[in-house]
Image: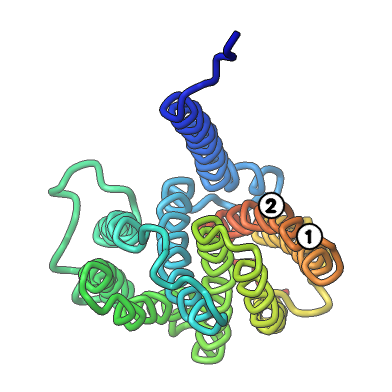
Amino acid sequence: MSSIRPSADAGGEVGAARVSRAGGRRAVAVLVLVGLAALIPLVGPPVVLRGTGEAAVPADGGIALLRTVLFAAVCVSAGELFAARLARRVPGAPLDDKPRSWAPVAAGAGFVAALGLASVVANGNLVPRRFSDMDIGGLYETRDGMLALLEVNAFVVAGLCALSRRPATQGWALAAVAVAEALRAHPTTEYSPLLGSGLTLVHVTCAALWTGGLLHVLRLQRRWRDPEAGAALLGLYARVAAVLFAAITLTGVGSTLRRMPAGTVLEQLTATAFGRALLAKLLLVVAVAVLALCARRRLRRAADPLTAYSPARAEVVALGAVVAVSAVLTALPVPIRW
């Protein structure tokens, strides 16, 4: 009596079904994470402002959400360029086998967010209810307006470069966004604004490379399906990320001391909205550092380097939360220097 065996076509259909289900679960997980990330800028400002006696910035939740999208767009695009550069240094890496670029979509999302922020500036830092509320021409007459227009145009250029044959040229447009954000965060009325802008520029740049770089490294590893090349890429990223983390820490401490004098830091971390959001960001960064150390230790000592991927994925999620909290900080009143 002959046994009945499944045909090759049936086996292929089963495998395709499993891949489809796995892809569906990943899509649902991504949607859930994006939804949770959107709640941070929307809910965060009123939560940290409660009981401080500080006045809320008009439309703080909407502004924080738009700036979260803007920051995320920079991270995704800059991270792709950074990870692609690292991949070229991995011996034997299948460079032709790479995932679809997210840079064009990121540039589009960044453009929409920058346009929304520019409309707020055009209405005197209030959310416009009608098109007639906005003074578009007035954007050219103020520093904030010019910076807002620079970001809008920079994302347009970044998107065009991402679709061109030389996508690496979008790095210049992304750098323009980072410079605009650094200048916007430190108005000329502030003491030593150039120093503050310099610290913010380094902080934003390193954070974008760290966050977006890890995201794209994991995407490359999944695409390659080559454990040795994937482990080598993650190890190379880990060495550079250590330098980025040091720069982020130093510039973060410097910026904090400029906002809050050393003698008042502990009190303002709990008494002001800015301090509370900063404390939440600090705790998240500590969690990210622990996950990063766990991933690096597994990468070096574990018999199977693939075990390092789990904490690295969790690190990406935590870094996404850091980006959202950072956006909340930009929508909160700056603490008074006591």
Amino acid carrying label 2: it is: Ala
Q: Residues within 10 Å of mark 1 (few under 14, many from 20)?
A: few
| Residue 38 percent coordinates (x, y) | 50, 43
Question: Residue 304 shows which numbered tag?
Answer: 1
| Residue 124 in view here | no
Residue type highlighted by circle 1 = Asp
Residue positioned most to the top: 1
Q: How many numbered discs, if any?
A: 2
- Badge 2 marks a residue whose secondary structure is helix
**Left-right relation of 246 to 18:** right
Q: Residue farthest to the right?
A: 301
Q: Which quarter of the rendered picture does the N terminus lie within?
A: top right
**Residue 314: numbered disc:** 2
Q: Is residue 129 above or below residue 91?
A: above
Quarter-of-image position of residue 67? bottom left
Q: Position of residue 13 (x, y in %)?
A: 44, 27
Report if residue 327 is visible in the image: yes
Q: Nearer the viewer, residue 62 or 263?
A: 62
- Compare residues 245 and 9 and report the one nearer the observer: 9
Dot 2, how many residues are within 10 Å of its Cα: few (below 14), some (14-19), or many (20+)?
some
- In the depicted structure, whether residue 185 falls above or below residue 121: below
Give the percent coordinates (x, y) of residue 167: 29, 75
Residue at 15%, 47% in the rendered image: 131
Residue 286 appears in which quarter of the rendering?
Answer: bottom right
Where on the picture, by quarter, is residue 278? bottom right
Q: Secondary structure at mark 1?
A: loop
Is the Cβ of the residue at disc 1 closer than 8 Å to that at disc 2? no
In-front residue for pair 119/204: 204
Provide residue 338's location: percent of width, then percent of height.
73, 74
Furthest toward the front, the residue is 1
Name the residue at 27% across, 73% down: 154
Point out the frontmost of discs 1 and 2.
1
